[in-house]
Image (cartoon, grey):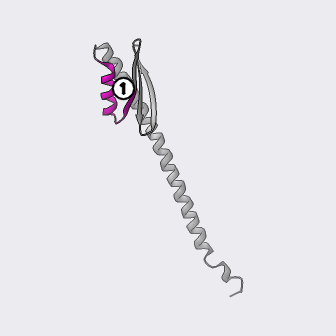
Amino acid sequence: MKKGARSEEGYSTLIAASLCAVLVGIAGMIVVITGGVVAQHHAQVAADMAALSAAQAYFAGEEPCRVAEENARDNNAALVHCQMEDSDAVVTTRVKRREARSRAGPI
């Protein structure tokens, strides 16, 4: 063996281990980002459903914000804000740390 060849032993293991660590880090970032996107969409769907149910409850003579809260809870979301503006229901929901706002009213 050449004298300089010994100094390069183990480098491929080090490079492979480093590459694995980088790939695991990238995969972790993808999981976190995807989780945030899913939570945002979940919050938006819950807000849309809660606003629709609140608007329907308003025209049925029921308490719209109570109905919106029940609907948000049924969709595994928290109702952050609910207000009737004229005949429109304006609702904000939260899933994890993501919030979404929706408005529904008569057509």
Secondary structure beneath label 1: helix
Q: Is residue 91 left or right of residue 27?
A: left
- Residue type of the residue flagged with mark 1: Ala
Chain part drawn in magenta: 63-80
Q: Quadrant of the C terminus?
A: top left
Query: Between 78 and 105, which is closer to the camera in this rendering?
Result: 78
Q: Is residue 44 above or below residue 105?
A: below
Q: Closer to the camera, 89 or 80?
A: 80
Whether residue 69 appears in magenta in the rendering, the answer is yes
52 inside magenta stretch: no
**Could you tell me which quadrant the N terminus lies in?**
bottom right
Q: Percent x, y for residue 35?
A: 45, 44
Number of residue marks: 1
**Can you give x and y, in whole percent of width and height, for residue 38 in the image?**
44, 40
- Report the residue at 66% width, 83% height from top: 6
- Determine the residue positioned at 61% across, 73% down: 12
Q: Please tell me whether the stretch drawn in magenta is mainly helix, strand or loop.
A: helix
Residue shown at 44% from the left, 39% from the top: 39
Q: Using the rendered view, name the quadrant where residue 22 is placed.
A: bottom right
Q: Is residue 2 above or below residue 41?
A: below
Outermost bottom residue:
1
- The percent coordinates of residue 20 (x first, y second) are 54, 63
Residue placed under numbered mark 1 in the picture: 50
Number of other residues with Cα within 10 Å of mark 1, as a class: few under 14, some 14 to 19, many 20 or more: many
